[in-house]
Image: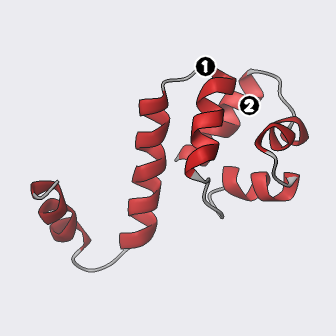
Amino acid sequence: MIGEHIRTLREANDILLRQLAAKLDIDQALLSKMERGERSFRREDIDTLAKIFKQSKKELITMWLADKILKTVGSEKFSKEALRLAIENV
């Protein structure tokens, strides 16, 4: 989710993978994995990306958190029930 969105933003702004990786101070291969959803972005990356792409920090953080939640609950049998319970207690 967030990775695909960042790739779309990067390509729309004609920024090369290596250029964005340098701005985030990470390896180009790592950023590639992040865009493919194989690795997670760090929280501080999201703040930096919001500034670089002039995007809503709230929107990017929301997508980032959603990704983290989905990776945690995955395809667990009772994931929907667990998410409902969590929402009730937020």
Residue 74 visible here: no
For residue 15, side relative to residue 44 (left or right)? right
Per the image, the residue denoted by label 1 is 54
Marks 1 and 2, the one that precedes in the sequence = 2
Q: Are marks 1 and 2 in contact (CB under 8 Å)?
A: no
Structural distance between the alpha carbons of marks 1 and 2: 12 Å
Q: Quadrant of residue 19?
A: top right
Label 1, secondary structure: give it.
Answer: loop
Per the image, the residue denoted by label 2 is 10
Q: What residue type is labelled 2?
A: Arg
Of residue 34 and residue 36, the one placed in the foreground of this image is: 34
For residue 21, side relative to residue 84 (left or right)? right
Label 1 neighbour load within 10 Å: few <14, some 14-19, many 20+ = few
**Residue 90: x %, y % from top left:** 17, 53
Q: Residue furthest left?
A: 88
Q: Which residue is drawn at 40% across and 52% down?
A: 66
Q: Which residue is drawn at 48% across and 48% down?
A: 64
